[in-house]
Every structure is written in C-alpha cells, then in structure tokens.
Image (cartoon, rainbow, N blue to C red):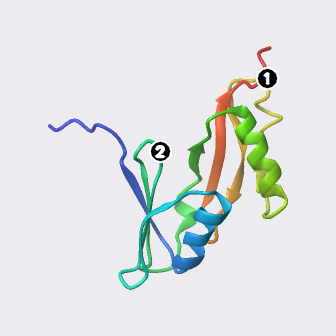
Amino acid sequence: MAAVVRCQHICLLTDRLRETRDFYANTLGLTPAYYDETVGVLAITLADGFVLRFEAKGPPEPDGIRFIGLELSSFEAVDDLYEELARRILIVEDLRARYATAKGPYGFIIADPNGYRLKLFKYGPKVQP
C-alpha cells in the first residue's frame, strides 16, 4: 500500500469565484497562484505548498467543514491581523483570551464570502504560565 506523504490541497465549491479571489487576496494578502473565470478555478498556494482550490461548480458547502486552519508566523502577527480585520469584517469567534496562557490555537475565526470558516492562529500559549 502506498504511504500518504501529506495533505497537498483541499477543493471547495463556490458560486462567487471573483469575490472569493478578492477576499483571499485583498483581505488576507494571499496571492492567487492560478485564477481563470472561464474554467471556474481559483488556486491559492500557501508558503508550505498547501493549496486552497476553489471551483465554480455549484454553491458552497460549508456545513461539512468546521474550519480551515491557517497558521500565522507569530502571536504578534495574530494580534496585528485581528486588529486590522476587526475594522473591516465580522470576527466570528475570538479565541485569543482562552489560549493566551493555555496550550492551543491562539487566534480567531472569520468567514470567507462562501461561509467557509477560517481559523487564523498560532499555537500557544502566548504567555508561559
């Protein structure tokens, strides 16, 4: 049996391809690696090579996905991004207080235009107890 090496991508449905591209590029600062409206595909490659792929083949199905975790480089990056995004979009859940002194995902949750929840985090604790 072949050994699975890593999870390389996730494919999500969307009926808002352009709005999705703009959200990930303009709100989160991620650069699309591939975008073609005629084919109906958006691909965003993260720093570690993982790909978020969106296909315009039907309405989004966020009910089956609890969240997509996007790890940031530092606790300060989490706080900075929270402050920036809180002025522009709805923060679905703020996890920072809970994990400031406990081990876990120090961060927060937002939703993209399709309703997919994104957990933006850095594993903690931020402050050593």
Q: Which quadrant is the C terminus positioned in?
A: top right
Spatial separation of the CA atoms under disc 2 and disc 1:
28 Å
Q: Residue at x 67, y 33 (%)?
A: 74
Numbered label tally: 2
Disc 1 is placed on an element classified as loop
Which residue is under mark 1?
A: 101
In the rendered image, residue 28, in percent from the top left (x then y), is placed at 64, 57
Q: Is residue 46 left or right of residue 27?
A: left
User: In the rendered image, which quarter contains the N terminus?
Assistant: top left
**Residue displayed at 79% across by 21% down:** 127
Residue under numbered circle 2: 47
Residue found 39% across the figure and 53% down from its top? 9
Q: Is residue 125 above or below residue 43?
A: above
Q: Which residue extends farthest bottom?
A: 38
When the figure is inspected, residue 41 is found, relative to residue 108, above or below; the finding is below
Q: Label 2 sits on what residue type?
A: Ala
Left or right of 83, for residue 30: left
